Structures are given as structure tokens and as C-alpha cells.
Image: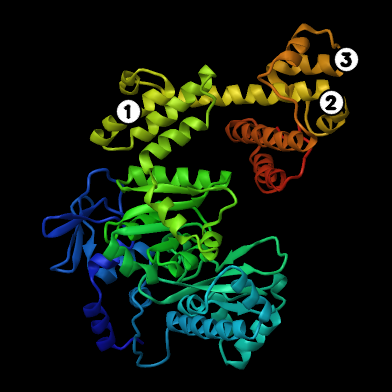
């Protein structure tokens, strides 16, 4: 049991604003703070938190209580579990009249294994050489407690020799049970390790970077009682003091980027856990009200991640900008090559978020195509609609100029969903006709197509597909297709990729029709849905061409 005096000490050491603010965005409202209630859907804030009384209350649904009650409701925990959760969040050590808690046992495993990882790094020349080659200094290795995990068998041996409970190590995300419960295996092996801390300094998990040829470059701890990657930012516990002081927060893509940013003096840098920013990150980002700088790679994936993050942050009212590092110029490598001043210059010239979203959205469409232009307009109208009226009005001129339309269009009642649907249909047409044009010029690919698709899948172009197969090269529409520059001839790999996407869309449509078909018996319907969702679509997404099954109906 938890000692009562320990519970009282915990209550006295935490602030309800920090507790609630870890889950929802709080905004100052006089002496109190307000937010949209996390316990019921609402658009107008009626959820009030009082720092003086250390309680919360919702005037909409009537819920209320202290920090412990809040954690109990949010996490669906019992009273003792909520206390232990709070203690782990704020790195507070509870006293027990007898026994111990799951949280303290898990933390003990994480702390012990982390120290062992650090010790291993100093004994592994290959891992040390890799860090040196990336420009990581010894002081950075020590500051970030970078380590190395050897083979999985050595992990198990260490846990057993240190008398650490293997089931608790499973709960901590260090090891896992093998298939058919045939022994344990280590989740990280032969990787450089980066310990991940909660904002208040308690270790909660690890990230691991391979130095072998493992296809997964980075692996993170799994979801545990302590580790929730959607609410964590790597390096935040070391960066928060600078964030509050300098009113700036730099979000980069990887662990090494954070390490090198800090090494160069940009100590406000943090990174996500291998996932995109989510609304769950917003309360943490809001603390200290910093300006947010998104510092991402300038490749296709980096641009897409920056666009998504900038859109979400802009709608949430954050100020800041976006820096896209030139392709081939990784920020960590730039700093390692003594180009810190160049990095600083790029950060100073960050593109403001809202213009970035508007410009990159327009670049994603062929604005010479009326239907694509309509879809771009719909996307921008939807984005601008999520901003405050004053901010929206300020950026309508930019959006209208880039699109080449009248500003008044953004105030008209436009059916956004219909515009997107029409554009999706247009893209389907382009995909189908691109397949046909490629087959006209590369008939050796016909067998690959026939092995996986059916004539009827080409819809209104089914007769054209039949004409192609019959060798009707003089067919007027086929002749026209050969000279139409809208559709291009693809390579074999491009054709394979397009067929995979084509088949995925076909199965998505098939799935919807099966779900809505009242004539299919329940057992048969369940079998079809399960086969499509758990077998066919995953295989297609893994890169396998799967023959279309016309019998799934």
C-alpha cells in the first residue's frame, strides 16, 4: 500500500495546471484557465481549472475534482493507479507500507538498463566510431546519455544477473515474449540507444538506431504504462528551460538532429518519436508560448510532414515558421561540418507557417487543369476556414493570387467535398488511361496487367481496353491516346506501383459495397471483409501484386 503521508506530499508537490495541461490546451481566463472539456464534445470552452483551489470543473457536463480525480477519469485508472501515474509523470518517489508499485518497478528496470547501455557504448569501438563520424562530441554523448545495446541474449543475461524481473522488463518495453510463448527476446539489439524522458525528467523508454544493415533504421519502445509517443518529444526535458527563456521551440526529424542542434547551441530543439505531430502534442508545445520552428529535410517526405504539421499548428493558433533543409544537406551533418552559422541563417529565414501551407498546397496541384485547380481551391478554403476570421482575411489575397481566382470566391458557399470527389474521379481517369497508353507503347507489359486486373475494372474505358487487347491500333481513341501528353508512358516499376494503388482503390470500393449489401449472409460478409482488410490490402501495401478476386461479392 502507498503510505498516506507520501500521497499528501505528492499532492503538495504538483500543480493541477501542469497535470491538466499535459492532456488539454489551457488558456488563461482571468484568475483561472479554460479549455474545451475532454470528457464531452463541445465547441465553446466550459471546462475551468482553478490554480488557487487546485480543482477543475466543467459547467457543461458537471465533472470536477482534483488532479488525482482528473487522472482517474482520463486514464480510466483506480485511485492507487492514478497516484502512481502522477508520481511517474512528475518523477516523484512514493513510499509504500509494504511491497512496491508497478510504476516504480518499471522505472527501476528502465534506469538500470539505461546505465548498462551507457556502459556498453564505451566498450564498443564500432558504435563509438559511428557517433564520432557523425560529429557527436563526448559531452553530447554524456548529456544525452547515449548508449549501445548488444545482442538480445546479452540483454536477457544482464536482466537476470541484475535480479530484474523479466515480466517487469516486458512491461517496460525492454523485452517481449516470443511467438507461442517460447522465451523472451530483446526489442532492441545491436543499436545505439537514445533514452527518452518525460517532460519532468523521468525515463520512460528508448529509441534505437541500427549500425548494421537492419531495414528498420530506428525503433522506439512500444506503448507502455509510461511511454506514449503521441505525448512525448525527444529532448524536451533538456530543452524546456531554453524554450521558456528564448520563447522558441525547434522541431526536427530525428534523435541525432536534436543532439547536434544542442551541440551547436540551439538548445531549444526537440523531435517527435518517429511519428507526425498530433493534437496530443499541442499542450506540451503550448507551454511557455514559444514560436515554433519546423526544421525538416527538403525531400518529399519532409515536405509532406512539414505541410501537415504547419497546417495543424496554424489552425491551433501557433506562431512560427518552416525551414526545409536543401536535399542532401542533413542539419546534423551540416553542424558536424562546422556549418552552424549556415543553419542559424536558415532558421532566421524560416518561412511563416500559413504562407508555407498555402504555397505548398498550390504546388501539389496542376493549376493548368481546371479540375485540379478546383481541388486546390477546396483544400485551401478548408485550411483557411480553420483560422480566425482576421487571420483568414489577411491571407485570402495570397491564396487567390496563387490560384488566379477572385478573392470573393473564398466567401462563396462551395461544396468542398464535391470538388475533392470530382478531382479524385479525374485522377482515376488519368491512372486508367496512363495504363492503357503504356500498354500501347510497351505491349510486353500486357501479361503483367492481365495477371492482376479484370476488363470491367476499367469502367467506362473497358471497351477501349478490349480494343487494345484485340490489336485495334487504328481505333480513333487509342490513336488519340498515343499523342495526348496528359498521359505518360511508365516504366515497369512505375506500372507495378500504379497497379498496386489501382487495386487498393478497387478493393476499398469493394469493401464499401460489401458492407452495404444486405443480400450477403453475415458469415460470408465477415469472411470477405476480413480477407480484404487483413490479407489482400496489406499484401498490396507491402508491394505484392495480388490478382483481383471478382468472387468477393
Residue matched to label 3: 471
Tell me which numbered mark, 1 or 3, is placed earlier along the sequence: 1
On residue 396, the disc is 1
Left or right of residue 286: residue 45: left
Q: Is residue 151 above or below residue 217?
A: below
Q: How far is the residue under mark 1 from the one under mark 2?
A: 46 Å
The residue drawn where x is 44% and y is 34% is 359
What secondary structure is marked by label 3? loop
The residue drawn where x is 68% and y is 84% is 154
Q: Is residue 15 above or below residue 498?
A: below
Tell me which numbered mark, 2 or 3, is placed earlier along the sequence: 2
Left or right of residue 343: residue 495: right
Tell me which numbered mark, 1 or 2, is placed earlier along the sequence: 1
What secondary structure is marked by label 2? loop
- Residue 99 falls in which quadrant of the image? bottom left
Q: Nearer the viewer, mark 2 or mark 3?
A: 2
Residue 23 is situated, as x and y percent measured from the top left of the image, at 33, 60
Taking depth in this image into account, of 60 and 205 the one nearest to the observer is 205
Amino acid at each position: 500500500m502507498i503510505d498516506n503521508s507520501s500521497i499528501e506530499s505528492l499532492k503538495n508537490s504538483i500543480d493541477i495546471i501542469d497535470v491538466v495541461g499535459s492532456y488539454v490546451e489551457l488558456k488563461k481566463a482571468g484568475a483561472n484557465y479554460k479549455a474545451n472539456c475532454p470528457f464531452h464534445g463541445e465547441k465553446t470552452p466550459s471546462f475551468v481549472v482553478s490554480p488557487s483551489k487546485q480543482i477543475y470543473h466543467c459547467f457543461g457536463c458537471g465533472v470536477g475534482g482534483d488532479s488525482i480525480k482528473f487522472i482517474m477519469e482520463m486514464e480510466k485508472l483506480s485511485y492507487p493507479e492514478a497516484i502512481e501515474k502522477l508520481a511517474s509523470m512528475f518523477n516523484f518517489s512514493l513510499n509504500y507500507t509494504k511491497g512496491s508499485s508497478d510504476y516504480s518497478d518499471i522505472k527501476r528496470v528502465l534506469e538500470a538498463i539505461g546505465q548498462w547501455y551507457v556502459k556498453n557504448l564505451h566498450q564498443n569501438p564500432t558504435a563509438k566510431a559511428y557517433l564520432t563520424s557523425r560529429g557527436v562530441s563526448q559531452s553530447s554523448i554524456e548529456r544525452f546519455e547515449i548508449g549501445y545495446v548488444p545482442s538480445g541474449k546479452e540483454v536477457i543475461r544482464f536482466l537476470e544477473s541484475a535480479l530484474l524481473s523479466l515480466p517487469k522488463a516486458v512491461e517496460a518495453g525492454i523485452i517481449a515474449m516470443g511467438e507461442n510463448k517460447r522465451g523472451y527476446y530483446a526489442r532492441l539489439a545491436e543499436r545505439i540507444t537514445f533514452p527518452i524522458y518525460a517532460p519532468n525528467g523521468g525515463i520512460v523508454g528508448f529509441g534505437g538506431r541500427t549500425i548494421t544493415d537492419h531495414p528498420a533504421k530506428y525503433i522506439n519502445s512500444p506503448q507502455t504504462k509510461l511511454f506514449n509517443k503521441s505525448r512525448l518529444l525527444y529532448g524536451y526535458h533538456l530543452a524546456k528551460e531554453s524554450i521558456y527563456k528564448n520563447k522558441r521551440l525547434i522541431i526536427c526529424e530525428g534523435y541525432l538532429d536534436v543532439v547536434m542542434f544542442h551541440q551547436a547551441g540551439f538548445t531549444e530543439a526537440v523531435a517527435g518519436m518517429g511519428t507526425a505531430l498530433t493534437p496530443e502534442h499541442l499542450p506540451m508545445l503550448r507551454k511557455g508560448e514559444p514560436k515554433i520552428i519546423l526544421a525538416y529535410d527538403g525531400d518529399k517526405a519532409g515536405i509532406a510532414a512539414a505541410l501537415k504539421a504547419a497546417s495543424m499548428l496554424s489552425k491551433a493558433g501557433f506562431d512560427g515558421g518552416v525551414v526545409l533543409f536543401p536535399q542532401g544537406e542533413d542539419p546534423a551533418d551540416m553542424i558536424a561540418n562546422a556549418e552552424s552559422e549556415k543553419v542559424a541563417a536558415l532558421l532566421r529565414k524560416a518561412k511563416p507557417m500559413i504562407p508555407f501551407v498555402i504555397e505548398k498546397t498550390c504546388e501539389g496541384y496542376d493549376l493548368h487543369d481546371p479540375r485540379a485547380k478546383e481541388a486546390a481551391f477546396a483544400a485551401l478554403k478548408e485550411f483557411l476556414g480553420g483560422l480566425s476570421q482576421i487571420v483568414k482575411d489577411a491571407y485570402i489575397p495570397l491564396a487567390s493570387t496563387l490560384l488566379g481566382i477572385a478573392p470573393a470566391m473564398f466567401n462563396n458557399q462551395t461544396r468542398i467535398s464535391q470538388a475533392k470527389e470530382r478531382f479524385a474521379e479525374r485522377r482515376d481517369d488519368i491512372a486508367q488511361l496512363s495504363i492503357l497508353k503504356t500498354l500501347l507503347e510497351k505491349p510486353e507489359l500486357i501479361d503483367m496487367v492481365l495477371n492482376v486486373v479484370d476488363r470491367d475494372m476499367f469502367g467506362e474505358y473497358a471497351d477501349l481496353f478490349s480494343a487494345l487487347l484485340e490489336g485495334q491500333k487504328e481505333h480513333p481513341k487509342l490513336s488519340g491516346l498515343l499523342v495526348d501528353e496528359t498521359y505518360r508512358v511508365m516504366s515497369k516499376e512505375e506500372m507495378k506501383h500504379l497497379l498496386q494503388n489501382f487495386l487498393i482503390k478497387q478493393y476499398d470500393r469493394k469493401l464499401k459495397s460489401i458492407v452495404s449489401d444486405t443480400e450477403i449472409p453475415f458469415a460470408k460478409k465477415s469472411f470477405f471483409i476480413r480477407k480484404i482488410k487483413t490479407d489482400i490490402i496489406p499484401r498490396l501495401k507491402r508491394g505484392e501484386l495480388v490478382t483481383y478476386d471478382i468472387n468477393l461479392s
